[in-house]
């Protein structure tokens, strides 16, 4: 009898500590991402009240679908920025993979082979970036900027600046379809997020990423294989850019040679909005996701408000600047407090 | 009575935790070369930084040309005719000699920089000193010796009355040194007073008129050079008080753990030594003798040009630090902040970064095990930190060092290289680090300790290798260890 109550008591306690643990995590999140969450909430409320179309299930799912494309690449970009690097090539990698897959699909090759080939092309592009950056002293900025230009040029040459139409039903379903009510890209996004969080928070590699961004010399002295880490993150960035490119191509039901232009900047903005330092050593996927949603809401909201697309650029730039400034002010306070 | 160019009287300077200058007196006459001698940390740099306006004195007076003056900054110093030529030259490599001499006071003609005029003027300064340098050459085309001459020319062009030279011969060849001394004689003839800092006692007979020995932040003796011998100077230099004394316990010394044969790199030449399990092998020498460079060559940070390394009697190859890590060689670098810690990360992160294998398999992280490792070392090394999640940068130097040491201990190294393990650490924490080192040696770890503090190395080391100019000049056993013996082989007498 005593035993039973004891067990029950234990179970109760266990549940309690689980709940308090949950609140602790939430508390930590609010402490770290308060500025971003506030901003996201304000943005949400403004859009919900100023438009009739924003706060509908259809639109919100649509926003998530758009956000997913940014999240794929932003997750890899988070790791790269934490490690003290940058990848400017991802927009062009998207176009390249989309083009390869679209042409293959056009030639009647089965859809899954097209997707695999696309992913392979992106992975190789990332691998090349990684190998160059890991083995030379060249700046990641200039290396990936160069590969961006080369790939974009190749896409224009091969497509002769023309659009490639997609007809394969399976391929169109890859980015445009859904599983029950949930669109495929949202499911991919969840997989990518879980994968990235596991890598960064739970694996040796993750610690090494923080270490080489935090102090490359100390990392080297600690016996960390810096080259391996760098090659991994740039390769992963290429693979995820390929995924973005394939989803984009599928959703547009065609591949335009200009697809993905400037998306590397959206990814970087999402990561930095999420509090990851461009100086390296600090950051997390959670922040990046919030950052990606802020950018997603801005893009979607400005469209819904039917703002002129040139004006959208101006507003988007200003809003991002304000959000980053809010985080900057807050982290400065945090730094002083700790 | 002859007029002094410069009189520094009873200069005091305190830093947080360090009393760097405790009443230094220094007088310089026109046309005199006044050599300042002292061990590492005796206060030479602090003194010349005060003279150059980089640091401010806490107490004391500085008289220049018979007038009590305050030096508030670098510009003040220059206006009083004081010029310092630092050991690390600070010329802009991509500009010409003339542009460097006139940097920040460029001559102009019609609002544009008058390059030709500047070059003519610079060439005149150079010629007056009897030097063979083309004022139109780029700095990076010059040798170190020539660059030094440019610094001297620059000083002269500022109408310098006092020129401070900080170890000017440390990277010069014999021929270049002769040229430099020739130049110094020209400056003397012009009545310029020269403060000459050096570790090379054998140079003194060539140029020094007067010497002052600094020790523990105080001027110990000032004498005309002809009235003192180099052996006496060494005695004055090393009579340092032995503070924070720590007595090691004796324990048996085991097999050879690391054996280095004929090791050479760009910075060190033909090093031979071995260190045994349970032994603390000291590396003594002045700053720049090549001790750190020797360790960097061993762990694969600097490229080896020759030599072999054996661990436990087996020849091995170390190409990069990751190899050294795998072979159980721990390296605790000298500059903790730049090379030792991950400042923006937590204490816990720093402690376990080298032993992630012990609690991470794939993406399975054993949090309990990680916490256990961290807690164990916090306890064993009594690391004082508000929590394991605190940023390591907010800890005191001593506690940061303990975290770095424990991060290596966790990886159970057989050989631990500690470069200046107590630099920038307060007295209490120093004693704790010594006790820890003693304990590690007792547990059979072979320790190599680089230290510039002679009392520390004499107390801690079983054996000492003395280095000078990239070579080992002497091996001293524990009972031969005295400050005089070490200094004898560390500097040129």
Image (cartoon, rainbow, N blue to C red):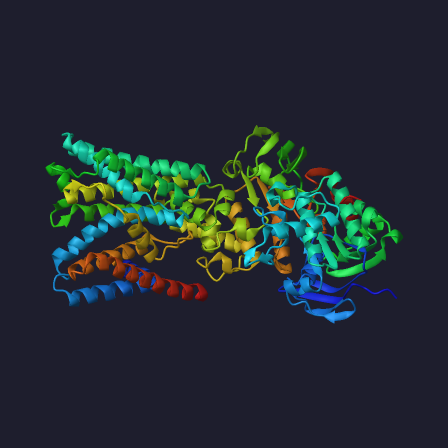
Task: Find residue B277 and report its image quarter.
Answer: top right
Q: Report the residue at 12% width, 60% height from top.
A: A56
Q: Position of residue B443 (x, y in %)?
A: 60, 43
Q: Position of residue A237 (x, y in %)?
A: 32, 42
- Eyeballing the image, is B438 above or below B43? above
Q: Position of residue B347 (x, y in %)?
A: 47, 55
The number of numbered badges drawn on the structure is 0
Question: Quarter of the image containing the N terminus of chain B?
Answer: bottom right
Q: Say whether residue A173 is left or right of residue A40.
A: left
Query: Could you say which is closer to the camera, residue B493 or residue A317?
Result: A317
Q: Report the residue at 19% width, 53% height from top.
A: A64
Q: Report the residue at 17% width, 58% height from top.
A: A303
Q: Residue furthest front?
A: B110
Query: Could you say which is closer to the camera, residue B493 or residue B443?
Result: B493
Q: Say whether residue A30 is left or right of residue B338.
A: left
Q: Position of residue B314 (x, y in %)?
A: 58, 28
């Amino acid at each position: 009898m005593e035993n039973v109550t004891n067990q029950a008591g234990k179970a109760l306690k266990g549940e309690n500590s689980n709940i308090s643990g949950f609140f602790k995590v939430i508390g930590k999140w609010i402490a770290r991402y308060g500025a971003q969450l506030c901003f996201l909430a304000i943005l949400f409320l403004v859009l919900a009240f100023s438009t009739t179309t924003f706060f509908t299930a259809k639109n919100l799912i649509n926003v998530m679908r758009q956000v997913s494309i940014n999240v794929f690449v932003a997750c890899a970009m988070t790791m790269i920025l934490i490690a003290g690097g940058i990848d400017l090539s991802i927009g062009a990698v998207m176009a390249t993979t989309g083009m390869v897959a679209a042409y293959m699909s056009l030639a009647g090759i089965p859809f899954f082979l097209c997707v695999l080939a696309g992913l392979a092309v992106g992975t190789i592009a990332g691998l090349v970036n990684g190998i160059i950056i890991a083995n030379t002293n060249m700046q990641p900025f200039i290396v990936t900027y160069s590969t961006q230009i080369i790939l974009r040029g190749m896409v224009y040459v091969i497509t002769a600046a023309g659009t490639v139409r997609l007809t394969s039903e399976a391929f169109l379903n890859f980015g445009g379809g859904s599983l029950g009510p949930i669109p495929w890209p949202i499911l991919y996004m969840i997989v990518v997020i879980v994968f990235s969080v596991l890598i960064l928070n739970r694996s040796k590699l993750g610690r090494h990423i923080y270490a080489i961004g935090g102090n490359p010399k100390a990392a080297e002295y600690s016996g960390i294989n810096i080259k391996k880490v760098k090659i991994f993150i740039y390769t992963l960035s290429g693979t995820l850019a390929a995924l973005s490119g394939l989803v984009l191509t599928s959703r547009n039901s065609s591949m335009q040679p200009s697809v993905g232009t400037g998306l590397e900047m959206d990814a970087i903005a999402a990561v930095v909005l999420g509090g990851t330092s461009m100086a390296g050593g600090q950051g997390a996927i959670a922040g990046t996701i919030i950052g990606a949603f802020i950018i997603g809401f801005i893009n979607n909201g400005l469209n819904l408000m039917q703002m002129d697309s040139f004006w959208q650029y101006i507003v988007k730039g200003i809003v991002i600047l304000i959000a980053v400034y809010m985080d900057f002010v807050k982290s400065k306070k945090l730094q002083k407090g700790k | 009575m002859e007029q002094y160019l410069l009189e520094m009287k009873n200069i005091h300077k305190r830093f947080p935790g360090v009393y760097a200058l405790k009443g230094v007196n220094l007088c310089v006459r026109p046309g005199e070369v006044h050599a300042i001698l002292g061990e590492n940390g005796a206060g030479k740099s602090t003194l010349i930084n005060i003279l150059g306006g980089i640091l401010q004195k806490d107490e004391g007076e500085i008289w220049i040309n018979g007038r009590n003056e305050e030096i508030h900054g670098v510009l003040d110093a220059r206006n009083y005719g004081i010029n310092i030529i630092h050991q690390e030259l600070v010329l802009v490599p991509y500009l010409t000699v003339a542009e460097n001499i006139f940097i920040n006071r460029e001559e102009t003609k019609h609002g544009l920089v008058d390059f030709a005029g500047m070059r003519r003027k610079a060439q005149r300064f150079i010629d007056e000193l009897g030097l063979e340098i083309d004022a139109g050459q780029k700095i990076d085309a010059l040798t170190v010796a020539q660059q030094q001459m440019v610094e001297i020319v620059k000083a002269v062009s500022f109408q310098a009355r006092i020129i401070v030279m900080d170890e000017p011969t440390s990277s010069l060849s014999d021929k270049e040194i002769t040229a430099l001394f020739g130049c110094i004689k020209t400056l003397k003839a012009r009545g310029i007073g020269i403060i000459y800092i050096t570790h090379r006692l054998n140079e003194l007979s060539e140029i020094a008129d007067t010497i002052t020995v600094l020790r523990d932040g105080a001027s110990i003796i000032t004498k005309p050079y002809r009235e003192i011998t180099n052996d006496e100077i060494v005695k004055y230099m090393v009579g340092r008080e032995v503070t924070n004394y720590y007595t090691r316990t004796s324990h048996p010394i085991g097999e050879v753990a690391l054996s280095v044969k004929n090791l050479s790199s760009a910075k060190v030449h033909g090093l031979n030594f071995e260190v045994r399990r349970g032994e603390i092998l000291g590396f003594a020498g002045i700053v720049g003798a090549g001790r750190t460079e020797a360790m960097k060559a061993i762990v694969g940070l600097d490229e080896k040009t020759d030599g072999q390394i054996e661990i436990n009697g087996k020849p091995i190859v170390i190409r990069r630090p990751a190899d050294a890590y795998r072979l159980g060689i721990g390296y605790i670098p000298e500059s903790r902040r730049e090379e030792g810690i991950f400042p923006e990360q937590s204490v816990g992160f720093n402690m376990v970064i080298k032993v992630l294998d012990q609690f991470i398999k794939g993406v399975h992280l054993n949090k309990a095990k990680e916490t256990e490792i961290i807690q164990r070392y916090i306890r064993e090394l009594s690391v004082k930190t508000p929590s394991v999640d605190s940023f390591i940068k907010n800890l005191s130097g001593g506690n940061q060092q303990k975290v770095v040491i424990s991060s290596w201990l966790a990886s159970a190294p057989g050989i631990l290289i500690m470069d200046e393990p107590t630099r920038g650490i307060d007295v209490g924490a120093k004693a704790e680090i010594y006790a820890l080192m003693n304990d590690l040696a007792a547990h059979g770890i072979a320790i190599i300790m680089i230290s510039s503090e002679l009392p520390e190395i004499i107390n801690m080391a079983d054996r000492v290798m003395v280095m000078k100019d990239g070579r080992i000049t002497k091996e001293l056993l524990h009972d031969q260890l005295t400050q005089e013996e070490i200094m004898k082989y560390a500097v040129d007498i």
